[in-house]
Amino acid sequence: MGSDCECEWNEVKEKVLERVRLFSQRKEPPLYWVMELIECLSSLNVRLPSPEFAELLVSYLCFNYNHPSLWKFLQQALSSRLLFPLQVLSLFSSRIIPHRHCQPEAYRLFLELLRQYAFSFDPNVVDYCKLKIISSVDTALQLSQTYDIPVLELGHVFVLFFYSIVIALIDSTFDDWGVQMKLCEKPCLNPKSDLYMDIDPNVIHSVKRNEYGEQIRKRNSFMALEVLERLTESRKATILLQSVFLNMPEKFNCLLQRIRFLESAELPCSELKLSKPVLTKIFANIRRVYDFEFHLNRHQLVGILVDVGSFNSLIRCSYSSRQSPCWVPFDIYMENAMDSKQLPTKSATDILTEGIKTLHTFNQASWQETFLALWLSALRLVQRERDPPEGPIPHLEARLSVLLSIVPLAIANVLNDEAEHDSSSVQDSMASEFRSEMERKSVDSKKHGLILSVQILGHFPSLLCPPELVVGAANHAAMKAACFIYNSMNGEDGSGTSIHSSNYTKAGGNLRHLIVEACIARKLMDTSVYFWPGYVSTSAVSLPDAATVEKSPWLAFLEGTPLNDPLINSLMVTPASSLAEIEMLYYIALNGSEMERPAAAKILCSASLSCGWYIQEHVVHYVVKLLFLVPPSHSGSWSHLVDNMFVLSAILLGVSSVDTVHIISLHGLVPTVAASLMPLCEAFGSLKPTLNSTGDESSIYMAFSLAFLFLIRLWKFYRPPLDHCVTRGGALGGELTLEYLLSLHNNYVMSFHDELKSHKDSSESSFLKPVYIDSFPKLRAWYSQYKSCVASAISGLSTGNSVHQVANKILSMIYWKMTKGGALSSNSSSTGGNACSPFLSAGEDGYQRPMLPAWEVLEALPFVLEAILTACVHGQLSSRDLTTGLRDLVDFLPASLAATIGYFSSEVTRGVWKLVPMNGIDWPSPAATLQSVESEIKAILAAVGVDVPNCSSGISPVTLPLPMAALVSLTITFKLEKSQEYIHAVAGAALENCASNCPWPSMPIIGSLWAQKVRRWHNFIVVSCSRSVFRHNKDCVNQLLRSCFSSFLGTKCVSAFKLTAESSVNGLLGNTNTPTGTCPSIAPGFLYLRSCRNILDEQYLKNVIVGLVVEYSHELASPERLKSSAASLSLATQRAKEAATLGASLLCVAGGIQLVQELYRETIPTWLLTRSDVKYDNEKKGVSHILEGYAMAYLLILSGSIIWGVGAKSRSGALCRRSRCVGVHLEFLAQVMEGNISVSCNPATCKAYVSCLMGLMLTLAPAWIQEVNVDTLRKLAHGLSRWREYEIAFHLLQRGGPAAMAPLAELINVIDYESKMPYS
């Protein structure tokens, strides 16, 4: 089609050109010419505006027929839309600017046209003309080559044309004045007069001799600056240039180079001095392009809602008052991270780093306020457990790790992050030296804010009081500062810090001293902070000369003292203070003598790991590195692991405590540790134990059990099989599979190796290799069998099968243990045949322990367990003998506990086994404590507003399913010893999860049995039992969530906005745990965090949270709360924001990414589609709808930001999910705004929601917008413009990437922007 049109134009070209020549000879007004030419072109079937005619006319004028009348004709043709101004100006630019010296009149006329038609742009052009115009402009200005992008749309061409003209006018003017600038890139319009057109030398000679022409040339330079000043002061110009600045920062850098050069250079040019006022205005206009912050019109309601920064003064707290509730995500995340039932697979440091950036942005706070809020949240986390109840849960060590290791590491990441999360950051587009200066100032600002935040912590003495566990460490830190000051005052080296033990008690150390030492250790601040007023007491600085000096055992270790028992014991209870000490210990564990290596491993896993906060990440790294004892050249033999069995066993036993495992998980090493355990399990489980193996920790079975049960804890397989079917992706999805952990590890390995390559350092890469489950056939076979057992009941075995033979040996061992003192006891009430007879071939060797590889034992155990349960059902095995047999199995092979738990939990959820009476005869009875446990459960739940269902009182006797009764009977036989913690950690969590799936009141029954065994765990057991009610009871979930909102926001019945004394963060999560010996009192938020992941109906949970946010936002608009003042509306908006913040935090901890994705894809669209218009009185109706829309928009964007972050830099998978979810949601809204989808909610709610969501996204998460499809942005922008939300519409397209420049240019000319929106 294009070639046919070209042929047609070539045929009529001469006729049109002849008509133009005739026009120049006639004296009619140009309007007549234009009308006549339109008739002529129409008769020749030439469509208007004609790109071909524009090229013909421009080439005719430049410069063979440069007649004034033709310029008048050209101007009339432009005003009559006979020509397209963008094309004409582009063609003139490429011809006239390089020849402005020899054609000063043409240049002057061109500047006049530019002043008049620079912003004339009509996007409504037929496709053929549009393509021709794009091609013509692109060819003339070389846009594609200059900007390295394909120019495909007319609006895109218009933006780049305008930016090129700005550059060209600057370059040409200063070239005329002889100012030489060093440019980073060649401009698309060359200001030099060296281009292709041949000009008659006689004409040039005559012009040069023409004094009038010389005056025009001088005036043209000033006129060019005047035109540039006129163009750039326009709001349209600001929008167009901002689009280049935001989406092509490296190109905008060229303009900034020119501005900075001219501002800084002292040039002797006289013209430059004369044009100084105009240049100042131009510089100010361009500076306005990049030195801006997005703010909505504060005179509009949506602008008041979205512009949270204007309300900062109301939400920022003084040091003596409560902290703003909008920082509550810090508290909720930290407390949630302490849940012993979950081991996070991602580093808490990384999560907290993103959280710091997100909340700093959302709260529009200074870095001082951000870091202060972070420290206060971490201090509250510690104070809640300052006197922890006993139980198998993480306590102070893990909480102190967050305060003194995780938080400082996260702050260090924020300080070292040179690329800000906001893609619109000015730094990204500045010249390199300017960018470096800005980055340095940014880091200095953050570091200054950090130092001030730590100094201000002194205003919170109640939070700084150290728990008993760290009083000595706090006093040590205070004395260290006192010694430094003392030595400085006496002219000694201030770095000498000999600690005087006699002054410990006088030092008055607190948690701030430990925080300061943690920051100094990571170079976040220096020792000058020791001189803060009041940091150390005067008495501590006045050190007595006679005081004794305490020598650290680590100093003796570094000096070469042998690792004897006294030194080992001292090193195990004293944390290392330097990385050099840890490295020396690591190399001894790796290469020392047979006696030294296990000792070094034990020391490494003791106090230095749990309390060595200042180097904890390095200690964890070396511990994990020791687990990877596979040489790089490993060929498949496991002998090297057997040789290192003592060291590996020492490490595995040393890290088995609940707090230590949790600390490792906080540092994000769960996938890596799981990968390191697989070869250990494969190796030790494939070997036969020696005859002298007696169950000690150095045996093959013990080494295998330590590794295997540790792997089980990390994998969390003890979750009941029902969870595999109904929660978060099933058995093949997410955190519940070994494959998922291995994929996380392998992804980490790849990214780690990429970082090492960039730093050209491979010394640390040898021990990190990808790991695949197919490399471990024994483990893979057991894993497949486990999944089969979960999916369905096990099938029988044929006699003679190898597994049958192993099962026979195990049963023979169990029955020999039962009968060695006499005949088998049986339940008197049961009858039947011997269900174990197929396996029992009695054998003379039945009394011997079978010497079998552990994998063979685990493979046979499900059949053994089925046999003994069946025997118990048929009366051939008493409950006491069943428990004894199970315990003997665990004593024989501790790893068998995993198989027992897996089988029993599967059978419990299948529901095929009979209920057995817990009467104290057949099975243990809970009667002694059951009633008191139930009453305490009721009291705990009633305190948080939850009505408890009827418990077991009155039911006689209480019953449990047989597998559940067997499991709990087994667990209460375990001794509570430190060395058995690796067993309790698996058994306790499995028991709780399994019991929670049994009908209520199974959990109180099991809790009562355990409370009878371990009285000091009473409070922990009662609280654990109280959580199980929320698994199945939706009403209790609803009541608990309402209590969370009221405890944080205050009850809705009070008229005042201010929170009551019981509300806020402490009301939500509590101050401290209840002292031992009293009935436990638990805050509703704490109870929610420990229960939310066990709630089966997550959809219901999500809907309740969303409903409560809506409910509170409506209540805030009540007449008694909302007055007529703007401050009252701002306060109501702030409270709605707090409700949405709490809702987003609770939603994210409960369901993570899945619930957030559903919020974007389903929940909010359903709310818009089905929300009926609630009837309110006229006084509050309108504002209530608007506050509802704002609260839902804030809930949505904060939830997404917590999960995905607000910045452009993130993991590729997270970015893909974010872009898909945000894109789908915004496309839905675009369809609503175009009328393709009808919503049922109030129009004011829908408008407020969309406007606030777009405004919040622009203000808080602009990087998200670039991930959205341009067509979606175009539809949203047009819809917003119809609502007269022009600011949001334009800024939305500005942030949409280079492709969004086209719709931006179209929209800016559709709307009379200058008259509709005041300049801000």
Image (spheres, rainbow, N blue to C red):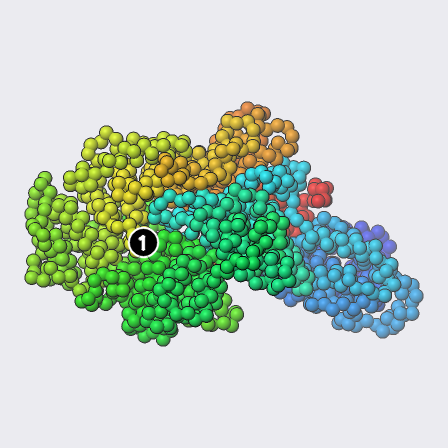
Residue 887 in percent (x, y) is at 20, 52
Report helix, strand or loop for mark 1.
helix
Q: Residue furthest top?
A: 1177
204 displayed left or right of 855: right
Front residue (pair 995, 1103): 995
Residue 1023 in percent (x, y) is at 35, 39
Q: Residue at (12%, 52%) from the top-left corner?
A: 818
For badge 1, the amino acid type reads Lys
Front residue (pair 2, 624): 624
175 displayed left or right of 817: right
Query: Vertically, is 1205 above or below 618?
Result: above
For the C terminus, the image quarter is top right
Q: Residue at (46%, 39%) from the top-left corner?
A: 1070
Q: Residue furthest front?
A: 546
Residue 440 occupies which quadrant of the picture? bottom right
809 displayed left or right of 63: left
State how many labels appear: 1
For the N terminus, the image quarter is bottom right
The answer to whether residue 475 of the structure is visible from this angle is yes
Query: Vertically, is 886 above or below 1031?
Result: below
Front residue (pair 546, 512): 546
Q: Residues within 10 Å of mark 1 (few under 14, many from 20)?
A: few
Residue position marked by numbered label 1 in the rendering = 978
Query: Vertically, is 1081 above or below 361?
Result: above
The answer to whether residue 1272 of the structure is visible from this angle is no
Residue 373 in percent (x, y) is at 55, 46
Residue 661 in percent (x, y) is at 38, 55
Q: Residue at (50%, 34%) from the top-left corner?
A: 1063
Query: Vertically, is 1239 above or below 653?
Result: above
